């Protein structure tokens, strides 16, 4: 971990790190974020790894402005009005994902929606401008800890990590952004309360439905709209049955699959996490009897991968 004041030189260096797939913690007006290039699956996997999260929760993608955001999400009139009113600022919009968006699927945990935000903090804005990348960033705290509102909080938590911490002083808001779900045309869902109030949202987008924010935050993998394959998923498979597709892991794959992907031939859990959702989509083809998944080690990122696969298997 290296920490430095968020001057121009440090921001240029931080932008270069992001482009290399490495992590940068940076201040936003709400809390410090643990940022990675959102188009780089391995970098996003490293964020989950560093947070020590046993699940893949979808992450917020930070962008320099509304134009950049429009490349990843589909804005209807409500979304456009909210973006005009509150961006840059502490509001996150969950929107249908735009086809062709280069965001890695791990960012949205396989969902067909994306959470987008244009932050107001000058350091966050300078970093986004300098790197010209979408930055995926959850709060920069280990899973289950308090959210960080100073560079000290981040530095104390991630002392040993390969991480550059940009110190921009304490975060002015100190509370995570308001998350509004506009992924369905017929409802405005409040997924997380924050500095932008429900009244302010209603003034621009109509009646707000208070989603079970607790459930959404604790277990977004349980949300009904969460991606599950249509085909059966068979876990810890050592062999391939008739008509089965294979989701492999490691150098030695059993023979006989009608369709095959390998999460990581090298047995690298970061690479496996980065490939997980895209490969599940690719194997979920009509005519496949089931998707047989080879054993994934239950340690580090493997826990989150196994959690996600168990949910996919339980969908039937
Ligand atoms: O203030 C903030 O929003 C901070 C700073 C760093 O910007 N970021 C933050 O990110 O709090 P994170 O990843 O900790 O929170 C993401 C929230 C979670 O509640 C997650 O469930 C929700 O956004 N979310 C993200 N993508 C979603 C999606 N596609 N559908 C539903 N909820 C989503
Ligand atoms: Mg958080």
Image (cartoon, rainbow, N blue to C red):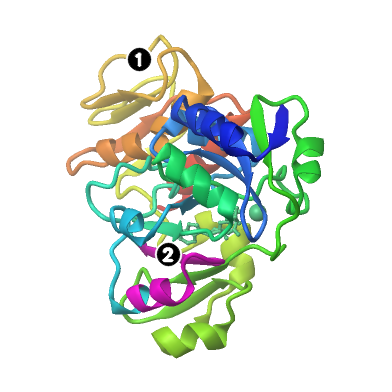
Q: Which image quarter: residue 40?
A: top left
Q: Measure the alpha-carbon separation of dots 1 and 2.
A: 40 Å
Tell me the element at label 2: strand
In this view, 182 is above or below 238 = below
Q: Is mark 2 within 8 Å of ligand 1?
A: yes
Considering the image in quadrants, where does the N terminus appear? top right
Q: Residue at x 75, y 41 (%)?
A: 154
**Which disc number belongs to residue 94?**
2
Tell me the element at label 1: loop
The magenta stretch is 80-95
Q: Quadrant of ligand 2?
A: bottom right
Q: Residue furthest top?
A: 252
- Residue carrying label 1: 254
Image location (x, y in percent) of residue 244: 27, 31
In this view, 60 is above or below 263 = below
> In the image, is residue 83 part of the stretch drawn in magenta?
yes
On screen, residue 135 versus residue 163, left or right, reads left
Dot 1 crowding, Cα within 10 Å, few <14, some 14–19, many 20+: few
């Amino acid at each position: 971990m290296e920490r430095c004041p968020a001057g121009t030189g440090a921001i240029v260096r931080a932008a270069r790190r992001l482009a290399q797939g490495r992590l940068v913690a940076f201040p936003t007006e709400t809390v410090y974020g643990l940022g990675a290039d959102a188009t780089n699956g391995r970098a996003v996997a490293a964020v989950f790894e560093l947070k020590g999260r046993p699940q893949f929760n979808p992450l917020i993608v930070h962008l320099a402005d509304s134009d950049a955001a429009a490349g990843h999400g589909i804005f209807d009139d409500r979304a456009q009005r909210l973006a005009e009113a509150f961006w840059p600022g502490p509001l996150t919009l969950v929107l249908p994902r735009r086809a062709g968006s280069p965001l890695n699927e791990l960012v949205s945990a396989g969902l067909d929606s994306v959470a987008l935000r244009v932050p107001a903090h000058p350091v966050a804005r300078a970093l986004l401008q300098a790197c010209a990348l979408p930055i995926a960033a959850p709060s920069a705290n280990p899973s289950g800890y308090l959210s960080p509102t100073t560079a000290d909080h981040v530095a104390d938590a991630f002392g040993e990590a390969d991480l550059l911490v940009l110190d921009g002083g304490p975060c002015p808001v100190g509370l995570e952004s308001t998350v509004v779900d506009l992924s369905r045309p017929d409802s405005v869902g409040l997924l997380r309360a924050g500095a932008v109030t429900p009244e302010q949202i209603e003034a621009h987008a109509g009646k707000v439905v208070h989603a079970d924010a607790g459930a959404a935050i604790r277990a977004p993998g349980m949300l009904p709209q969460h991606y599950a394959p249509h085909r059966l998923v068979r876990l810890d498979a050592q062999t391939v049955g008739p008509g089965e597709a294979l989701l492999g892991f490691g150098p030695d794959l059993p023979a006989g699959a009608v369709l095959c992907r390998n999460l990581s031939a090298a047995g690298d859990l970061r690479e496996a996490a980065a490939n997980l959702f895209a490969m599940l989509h690719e194997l979920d083809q009509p005519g496949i009897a089931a998707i047989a998944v080879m054993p994934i080690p239950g340690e580090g990122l493997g826990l989150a991968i196994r959690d996600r696969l168990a949910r996919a298997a339980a969908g039937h």
